[in-house]
Image (cartoon, rainbow, N blue to C red):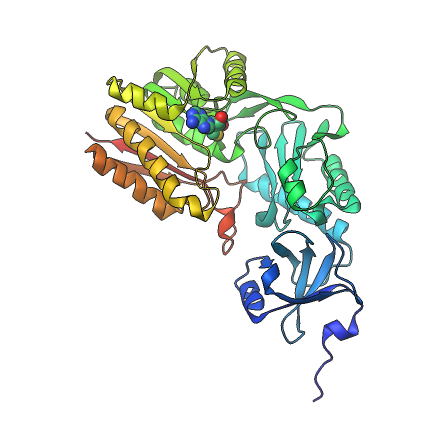
Amino acid sequence: MPKKPAASAKHAEPFVKLSTRGATRLQTRHPWVYRSDIVESAVGSKSPAPGSVVRVLDPRGKFLGSALYSSSSQIAIRMISHGSVDDLPALVAERIRAAIAYRKELVSDTDAYRIVFSEADFLPGLIVDRYNDVISLQILTQAMDAKPVRQAIVDTLRQEAELRPAGIVERVEARIRELEQLPPLASGLLWGEKSSTEVRMNGVRFHYDGLEGQKTGAFLDQRENYAAAAQYAHGEALDAFCYQGGFALHLALGAAGQTAAKCTSVTGVDSSRPALEMAEKNAALNGRELEWIEANAFDLLREYSAANRRYDTIVLDPPAFAKTKRDLDKALRGYKELNLRAMKMLRPGGILVTCSCSFHVGAADFLGVVADAARDAHKDLRLIESRGASKDHPILLNVPETSYLQCLILSVSN
Ligand code: SAH
């Protein structure tokens, strides 16, 4: 039988042809292919346009699916479909609706949760969070930045009966736009009038301002861990790296549906004054006054442990220490020091809630470093729960990047 002509010869559509290594990588169901694994890319005699949909071919020209092309990123393509894509905006709209439907089954006790988590929702380069009636989105790639795609995103979110937003804001990370060679853009309202609101997580109230703060505003990935931590926390509690008070407020108030909070005092520590100002406002919103300390948590823990301060509950939720693989050793040393100090300060029966949001620090690495800290602290700890991000941040099997958050809840025996 005569061989089928290679798709590249038949179609004048943009295509990329992969090396064997690139094609093998796609077989693992990871959606990314690096530029170094592309042997040929063309539309007619030109390169594919930035952000275009490309047909992906194996080294022999066999069609593997469709991907979003970036002309600047090292991740040259991100797969979007195993078939052909004729209408990207329509596909994006459909995937957003599917992501919303997925959450409907999984999310409870909150009006603040992630609606779209990029690759984990088959929408690489798009992040969408819901904060009650304000929707906050981030666009991370050339393809998602294209005008018709942006329009489809906003229209779909605006019209979704489930959401009924009063405002849609875009949060821009200047560095990401630079890396994607997209023109600079300011964060701001994309639709509607409202950019700030109030949300509830597990019955605890928080202010949300879509145009302030870190990330998309709050750390929604910790939402279920707040409730879990509140269940075990008791006595005198310290929330190190407290940001706007997510853990601290849950420790002070308890989570909805649980027995009353068992903490007698809660102190939050963060190096960011604006974060603490918001934490204080959040406490007031819940009718509480807590202690907030502006300090470097490393220094404070060192000082407190040297002064023999004792706590019954300590939460450690530092920023990602390992931004790249090269930082891994340094990151592990950082986690070890923090955990060691905290363990030394915990009374028998005390609770340690310890987190890592560094993707490069795997679950086994993190458990290992916490175990090392226990050894050096001469303490026996029992693992009560080993947790990850809330269910609205899905982990897609075979895409390790979607699993980045570790949260261990431990009990100190002696
Ligand atoms: N637990 C928080 C999220 C913490 S994010 C929540 O659930 O909302 C990490 C926080 O660490 C940020 O608020 C940042 O301002 C703070 N931070 C970074 N370096 C710090 C340091 N050395 N000492 C104290 N806080 C620090």
Q: Quadrant of the C terminus?
A: top left
Q: Position of residue 237 (x, y in %)?
A: 35, 20
Q: How many marks?
A: 0
Using residue 138 as the reference point, say whether residue 272 is left or right of it.
Answer: left
**Most foreground residue, 132 or 52:** 52
Q: Does residue 278 lie above or below 413 as drawn?
A: above
Tell me residue 97's x, y (percent): 68, 44
Taking depth in this image into account, of 158 and 370 the one nearest to the observer is 370
Left or right? Give the position of 196 relative to 318: right
Quarter of the rendering containing residue 377: top left
Q: Is residue 227 left or right of residue 369?
A: right
33 vs 39: above or below: above
Quarter that holds the N terminus? bottom right
Residue 307: name its quadrant.
top left
Residue 395 seen in render: no
Look at the image and tell me whether residue 297 can be seen: yes
Residue shown at 34%/38% (left/top)? 333
Q: Residue at x 35, y 46 (%)?
A: 365
Tell me residue 70's x, y (percent): 68, 53
The residue positioned 57% from the left and 63% from the top of the image is: 26
Q: Residue furthest bottom?
A: 1
x and y percent of residue 35 in the render? 61, 59
